[in-house]
Amino acid sequence: MNKERIFTSKVFVNQEMRDAINDVFDSGIFSNGEKAREFEKKFAEYCGVKHAIAVSNGTVAIELVLRSLGIKEGDEVIVPSHTTMPTVEPVLAVGATPVFAEISEESYILNPAEIEKLITGKTKALIVVHIYGNSGDLDSLKKICDTHGIFLIEDCAQAHGTRYGGKQVGSFGAAGCFSFYPTKNMTVCGEGGMIITNDDRIAKMSSMLRNHGEEGRYNHVLPASNYRLSEIHCAIGTKQLELLEDFIEKRRKIAKIYDDAFRNNRRIIIPSENKNSRHSYHLYVIRVPCEKRKKIIDEMGMENIFLGIHYPTPVHLQPAIKKIMAVPKLEITEKISGEILSLPIYPLLEEQDAAMIAEKINYFLND
Ligand SMILES: Cc1ncc(COP(=O)(O)O)c(C=O)c1O
């Protein structure tokens, strides 16, 4: 049995991050200050966009973008079901209806060929989720959105540093939404999120919506609320961002170790990197025969290695959704949810541990 317990993710913290927190203590300013503006500026530069707006989490980032675009009751928003609930919750929060679309069996991301048949006069937006850190087929999705006059929103919660055609994801549609939850490619060591956009109007609206609808001090022009990100989190975020490229390089090294170990195992389907893209491997997800999955998870757990499933129940089959709407049959989404298996991947994972994990999985799958 492995001495230390290994999970699918682990947060990297260094002395610079601890010092950055102390800087905030020394400054005496804990909200809406210089650290937030610095984090936003650097994140926008990294993504190659005009604006970045730091918010309290990734779910709120999506909701504020929908509100900024005027999406409301009676509107429809096309979404994948192979994602986590927070992609869809904001659609419900603004009173719009989610329309679930099928994914590609290779990329696990919205299949452009499945979109047009779902577009109606009520469709206002499409949310593509760059799940696991792979990139969607943004050329095709953008073309469909532009042709039909609907907004493309990118859920990049799992895709900091993922590139498509050399550009950062999140910079293709009306806006990109990121999460800094502790498991993500970079974190603020707590809860946090970011909206990025090149659109001045979305930037202005979402920064007002995040801050009580204020336009100028004590001048409230919109009904809104408080979705600000505190200075301590922004200070940590800036330090994590400086390391993001190194983190991704490390994740890609681990992914290559797994790829090489599994390539010839016919019971395992390894992840594919979408054409034109740089996968950031937020998660390394393989597919195994569904009748074997629980056994592998249990056997690996006995070895102190804890695997994950992202996600066991597609969103359209969640009780909260089935209660409020008739849901479609999504064959690929439903099939793969029984086969997917997430392996440990994070910058601190030792390469020999990745090789050992792969060896054990190959062993458990071959008996
Ligand atoms: C694909 C996806 N969308 C949205 C979110 C929501 O982010 P947060 O947890 O920061 O609200 C997450 C994170 O859980 C996610 O993985």
Image (cartoon, grey):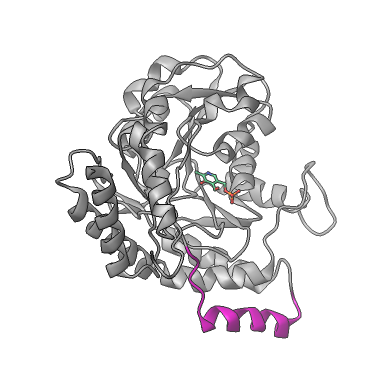
Q: Is residue 77 visible?
A: no
The residue positioned 68% from the left and 79% from the top of the image is 24
Q: Measured from the top left, where is residue 76 in percent x and y?
A: 57, 22
Horizontal side of residue 158 vs 274, given as left or right: right
Dominant SS type (magenta): helix
Say whether residue 21 is magenta: yes
Question: As drawn, which residue projects farthest toward the right?
Answer: 218
Q: Is residue 73 visible?
A: yes
The residue positioned 49% from the left and 43% from the top of the image is 155
Point out the image quarter for the N terminus: bottom left
Quarter assignment of residue 101: top left
Numbered range of the magenta stretch: 10-29
Horizontal side of residue 218 vs 336, given as left or right: right
Task: Using the image, determine if residue 101 lies above or below residue 312.
Answer: above
Q: Decide which of 239, 83 is in the foreground and name it.
A: 83
Quarter assignment of residue 102: top left
The residue positioned 85% from the left and 56% from the top of the image is 218
Task: Using the image, determine if residue 150 lies above or below residue 360.
Answer: above
Say whether residue 121 is magenta: no
Point out the image quarter for the C terminus: top left
Q: Measured from the top left, where is residue 149 in percent x and y?
A: 46, 26
Q: Decide which of 196, 349 is in the foreground and name it.
A: 349
Q: Measured from the top left, where is residue 154 in percent x and y?
A: 47, 42
Q: Measured from the top left, where is residue 114 in percent x and y?
A: 36, 21
